[in-house]
Image: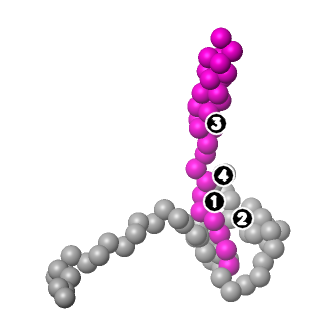
């Protein structure tokens, strides 16, 4: 059956693509400054030791990490119930 083969192939390709996904590090930017890709690449290369990026080195050069995986702030538990109107 061509349909079953096509479906099997599609599933195999999807599973393979998920297996190849890697977690990338944070994005970096310099707040309030214009910078080029070349400048970022130069600083990243100078702060990489043994294929591991030294985040303190990047921060010392003025870069700030942007992470999207920060937990959302939870409401304070000390607050009382909302007012009734």
Q: Earlier in the sequence, mark 4 or mark 3?
A: 3
Rendering coords of residue 65 (x, y %)? 59, 70
Q: Which of marks 1 and 3 is in front?
A: 3
Which residue position holds label 4?
50
What is the x, y in percent for residue 40? Answer: 75, 69
Instruction: Please identify, in this view, whether the residue under mark 1 or under mark 4 is nearer the observer.
Output: 1
x and y percentages locating residue 55 in the rendered image? 59, 66
Label number found at residue 44: 2
Near-viewer residue (50 or 43): 43
Tell me the crowding category of disc 2: few under 14, some 14 to 19, or many 20 or more residues within 10 angstroms, Cα based: some
Dot 1 and dot 2 residues touching (CB under 8 Å): yes
Please rate how many residues cluster around mark 4, counting C-alpha atoms within 10 Å: few if below 14, some from 14 to 19, many from 20.
Answer: few
Q: In this view, does 71 lie to the left or right of 77?
A: right
The mark closer to the camera, 4 or 3, is 3
Coordinates of residue 46 in the picture (x, y in percent) = 73, 65
Q: Is mark 1 on a helix, strand or loop?
A: strand
Rounded to the nearest angstrom, the CA distance separating label 2 from label 3 is: 28 Å
- Highlighted range, magenta: 1-30
Label 3: element kind: helix
């Amino acid at each position: 059956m061509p349909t079953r083969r096509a479906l099997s192939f599609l599933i195999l390709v999807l599973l393979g693509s998920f297996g190849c996904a890697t977690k990338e590090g944070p994005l970096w930017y310099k707040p309030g400054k214009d910078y080029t890709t070349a400048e970022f690449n130069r600083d990243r290369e100078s702060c990489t030791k043994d294929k591991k990026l030294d985040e303190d080195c990047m921060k010392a050069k003025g870069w700030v990490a942007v992470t999207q995986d920060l937990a959302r702030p939870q409401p304070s538990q000390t607050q009382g119930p909302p007012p009734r109107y």
